Each structure stands twice: as C-alpha cells, then as structure tokens.
Amino acid sequence: MTATPATETTGPAAPYEPTDRTVPTRSRERAHYDRETVHAILDEAYLCHLGFVRDGAPVVLPTLFARVGEALYLHGSTGSRPLRAAGREDPGLPACVTVTHLDGLVLARSAFHHSINYRSVVVHGTAREVTDEAERRLALDALVDHVVPGRSADSRPANARELAATAVIRLDLDEVSAKVRTGGPNDDAEDLALPHWAGVVPVAPTYGTLVPAADLAPGVAVPDYLTAP
C-alpha cells in the first residue's frame, strides 16, 4: 500500500455518512457522525479492539492504535494472523475497530435502569497492509506519540531488523459512527419515591507517580513531556 495518509482538512468538514452498519438499532439519538466528536473519542483512547473473522469464527483482539488524519494505524508482529491476512487477502482484511471510554456508573432505583455513561466509536472497513516505507515510519512514530506525545523524537527509532519484524495495517475512516450516553438514571415515574440512592458514580483515568527503570543510566532526567500539566 503506497497511498499517503489523509490529512486534516481546514474549516468545517462534512460528517461521516450513516450506513446500515453505523446506524444503531436502539437509542439512535445517541449516535453522532460529526468528525470532531469521532476524532476526539479516538484521540483520547489508548486501546482499541480489532474484530475480524478467522477460519469462519469471529476474533476480537485488543491492541494499540493511532489516528493520522482520516486513517487508523495498528501494528504487530509480521507473524500475526490478522496482519498477514491484511497483506495477503485481496483487497484486504474486512475488519471492525471499536473504542470505548467509560465515564460513569449510572445507578438507578430499579435494577432494569442501571446503565453507564460512555463514549464509543465503531469503524467498519477493509484493513490493508502498509508497505510504503515512509508511511510505515510515519505510522510507527504516530503509534508511539499517541501514547506519549513527543516520545518518538526522544527514543531510538526502529532499526532495519525491527522494521522487518513489524507489520502495519491501515483502516480508513470511511464508515464510522460514535455513540455517547450522558446524564443520570432514567427511572420510571412510579419508582422515584423508592428509598434507594440513585445517581452517577464518575469514572476517570488517573496517572500515578513515575517509576524509573531499575537500570536507568545515572543523570537521565525526566523529560518535560512527562511532567507538564
């Protein structure tokens, strides 16, 4: 694959076009197709789940990813079955990538109305192996910087042996939707007087104290990008 990654456009961009696969059957009011919402959910996440069919059975794998413009990049060993299939099959590997943030536990007065507040993105498409070396390096740098912005410039780049052992696949953001739930419980009117606490327990990620490697060379300072607010 030698196509260059799509880049951000200037000014308002058209929303993603809904399809049969991206329109939810329930709670359609929670669906979003604007690129700003989709990109924000993707860019805040570290982990995605890659779904595909292998030998007639569904497989879902957790993995790191990065967004560059209108493309998602995932990587792994050249021996990985899905990554091999993305390069071997024509036109590629039919896949579905999902990302979800858990923002709160919604506790209702009734068991039936318990829920969660969340933000999610689902991407359908065909994943293809990236073979162009410039795009491969761009993707691998993006994967490192997605975890810690600025880290790719502050670490040794992959050498020829490591690059040969690493496969990169790309899934374009063509068939995409986001789904978001916010707010409190939706209890039935007849349950509002029940003596049970109801509300939302917020859930948010936190970062702990840095733990230096045991074999860190003396005098190596903590980089600014790990201490900046």
Image (cartoon, rainbow, N blue to C red):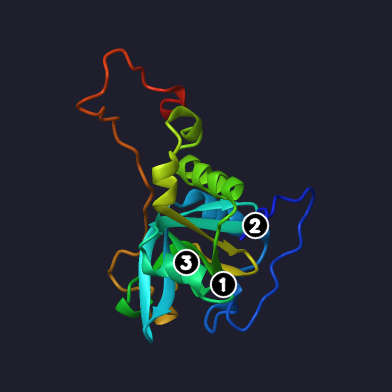
Which residue is painted at 49% across and 40% down in the image? 145
For the residue marked with disc 3, what is the amino acid? Answer: Thr
Task: Reply above or below: 18 against 4.
Answer: below
Select label 2 or label 1 by which is in front. Answer: 2
Q: Can you identify the residue that label 2 sits on? A: 2
Locate residue 55 relative to residue 45 in the image: left or right.
Answer: left
Counting other residues with Cα less than 10 Å from the Cα at mark 1, is it few (<14), some (14-19), or many (20 or more)?
Answer: some
In this rendered view, identify the residue nearer to me: 175 or 92.
92
Counting other residues with Cα less than 10 Å from the Cα at mark 2, is it few (<14), some (14-19), or many (20 or more)?
Answer: few
Can residue 96 be seen in this snapshot?
A: no
- Say the numbered circle drawn on residue 126: 1
Which residue is painted at 65% across and 53% down in the image? 5
Label 2 to label 1: alpha-carbon separation: 15 Å
| Quadrant of the image occupied by residue 157 | top left
Q: Residue pushed farthest right?
A: 11
Mark closest to the chain's N terminus, 3 or 2: 2
Q: Is there a contact, CB below 8 Å, between mark 2 and mark 1? A: no
Can residue 203 be seen in this snapshot?
A: yes
Q: Where is residue 61 in the image (x, y as percent from the top left)?
A: 36, 66
Task: Reply above or below: 127 against 161.
Answer: below
Q: Position of residue 215 (x, y in %)?
A: 21, 25
Label 3 to label 2: alpha-carbon separation: 25 Å
Q: Mark 1: which secondary structure?
A: strand
Select label 3 or label 1 by which is in front. Answer: 1
| Quadrant of the image occupied by residue 60 | bottom left
Q: Can you identify the residue that label 3 sits on? A: 98
In this rendered view, identify the residue nearer to me: 21 or 128.
128
Q: Where is residue 144 in the image (x, y as percent from the top left)?
A: 46, 42
In this rendered view, identify the residue nearer to me: 227 or 91.
91
